[in-house]
Image: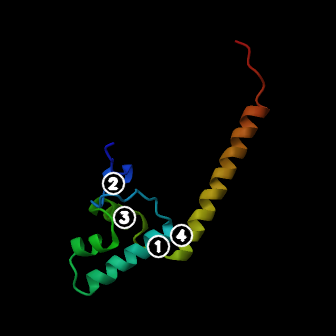
Amino acid sequence: MVERASPAADLKCPCGEIGMRWKRHSPEEIIAKLQQAQALIAKGSTSAEAIAAIGVTDATYFRWKREYGGLTMGQIARMKQLEIENARLRRAIEDLETSGRPATHG
């Protein structure tokens, strides 16, 4: 019988590490990683070294920096609240439009 490596051994995440699974980071984790990278850069590391240290790709780092760069944890929490409220209101509008609209005869 031939032994096969686990499927995880064949996976390669965007950061280049074999066997790692892709992960969705929470906004809080993103802010923390961005702050960690900024601290490394302030201490003299290059951007590439700092990005490697936080374990993401260049593209991910710069996308995060563009999207979350100047936000604080409080602003992230408020943004999450607004997104939840927005989704709730969209569902309410959709429900009103579908239930309150008379059938049209064409």
Q: What residue type is labelled 2?
A: Ala
Marks 1 and 2, how far apart at CA: 36 Å
Specify the quadrant of the image occupied by residue 18: bottom left
Q: Position of residue 61 (x, y in %)?
A: 33, 65
Q: How crowded is mark 4: few (under 14 residues within 10 Å), some or many (20 or more)?
A: some
Residue at position x 37%, y 79% from top?
36
Extreme residue in the bottom direction? 43
Residue at position x 38%, y 73% from top?
34
Residue bearing the label numbered 1: 71
- Which of these two is toward me, 29 or 75? 29
Cβ–Cβ under 8 Å for marks 1 and 3: no
Cβ–Cβ under 8 Å for marks 2 and 4: no
Residue at position x 36%, y 67% from top?
65
- Which of these two is toward me, 98 or 25? 25
Residue bearing the label numbered 4: 76
In the visual, does 93 lie left or right of 78? right
- Which of these two is toward me, 66 or 48? 48
Residue bearing the label numbered 2: 9
- Which of these two is toward me, 30 or 104? 30
Marks 4 and 3, how far apart at CA: 14 Å
